[in-house]
Image (tube, helix red, strand yellow):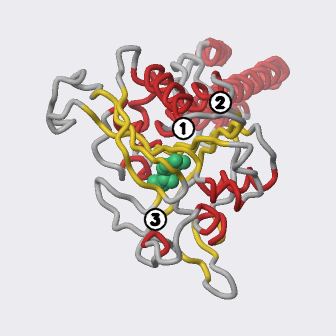
Amino acid sequence: MLEKIEALRQEVSALAAATLQDVEQMRIKYLGKKGELNALMADFRNVAAEQKRELGQKINELKTLATEKINSLRDQLASADTEDETLDLTRTATPSHFGTRHPLSLVKREMLNIFASMGFTIAEGPEIEDDWHVFSSLNFPADHPARDMQDTFFISRNPVDVLLRTHTSSVQTRVMEKTQPPIRIVCPGRVYRNEAISARAHCFFHQVEGLYIDKNVSFADLRQVLLQFAREMFGPETKIRLRPSYFPFTEPSAEMDISCNICGGEGCAFCKGTGWVEILGCGMVDPNVLKACGIDPEVYSGYAFGMGIERITNLKYRVKDLRMFSENDVRFLHEFDCAR
Ligand code: DAH
């Protein structure tokens, strides 16, 4: 029996397990009801009295050894198991995906920086406006089509017209009402028009408005600022041309084209063979507008210009479909990663 105990002691000491099931098998084999230790105990009853003390002690030692061994194997495997689930130090780190700036934000920032370098400060105004700031103060005749339901989203018409601004020119009025010249501002913001949504039109888009009011401001000043802007935005080779146009709030008014930045002015499909693409409207602020805002047109003059941020972005990045700007498709947005 002594040999049997010794053999079991060696066996138990050498036990190793790969899984918790293995450990359970061992527990059954050594410590279970029909296990080795109970078998030894059964034999122990038949042992001669003078051997009982020694053998009893050995059996107890073996039982303690087996219990401790099996418990420690179980503990090791159980803790390895939970570590597995929560922390694997060998795994490669999950890459973190940073967001990207929206292309319109990138272009807006670039536009504002160019104007800031020429001394313009930023002014902002509300998107929900009234008729006075969007139309009346800007010299729109009462029957001008832009005031029509077809073009403008009205929020209420009684007692006064409350509407979503259709252009950022409304911020001009808000600043002129509160500030005496010199005024030199650019006004970025979202505008709304009642248009059917398509690749080329949207019911909301973004503009940057510019306004400069001081003594002796001339059309030549306007032209120079716009030329500088065009060259910084589209490259030093860029040419501009001003075509006569009409806006209620400027007199004279013009639309500005830049030499097509795709073909360099040679003529291509993008510029419809003309070599020019339109980018903005501008003009000398109409004396009626200055008067409406409490500025004396006998003393002061000024110019204004307004352009669409989407339009400038399209020219820079050739985004063909306006809807992509508001769909938030990350595949599209990530294309501007490098432009950060
Ligand atoms: N407000 C005009 C528009 O929404 C753009 C514009 C044209 C603004 C001429 C101006 C300007 O300040 O002088 O289409």
Looking at the rendered structure, the secondary structure element under dot 3 is loop
Please state which amino acid type lies under the numbered disc 3: Arg
- Numbered disc 1: secondary structure: helix
Residue 95: x and y in percent read 52, 25
Q: Is mark 2 within 8 Å of ligand 1?
A: no
Rendered image: mark on residue 74: 2
Report the side of 228 relative to 85 (left or right). Answer: left
Q: Amino acid at mark 2?
A: Arg
Position of residue 13 relative to residue 182, above or below, is: above
- Say what amino acid the circle numbered 1 marks: Ser
Name the residue rendered at 68%, 54% in the picture.
Answer: 290
Within 10 Å of the Cα at label 2, are there few (<14), some (14-19), or many (20+) other Cα atoms?
A: many
As drawn, the residue found furthest toward the bottom would be: 158
Mark found first going from the N terminus, 2 or 1 = 2
Tag in front: 2 or 1: 1
Dot placed on the residue nearer the N-terminal end, 3 or 2? 2
304 relative to 179 in the view: left or right: left
Image coordinates for residue 129, horizontal then vertical, percent: 65, 67
Relative to the observer, which residue lies in front, 40 or 176? Answer: 176
Does residue 25 appear in the picture of this structure?
A: no
Q: Is residue 4 above or below residue 178?
A: above
Q: Residue at x 63, y 41 (%)?
A: 302
Q: Nearer the viewer, residue 243 or 226?
A: 243
The number of numbered discs placed on residues in the rendered structure image is 3
Q: Answer few, some or many: residues within 10 Å of disc 3's Cα (few below 14, many 20 plus, some between 14 and 19).
A: many
- Reading the image, the residue beneath label 1 is 105
**Label 3 CB, ligand 1: below 8 Å?**
no
Disc 3 to disc 2, how far (Cα)? Answer: 71 Å
Name the residue beneath numbered marker 3: 193
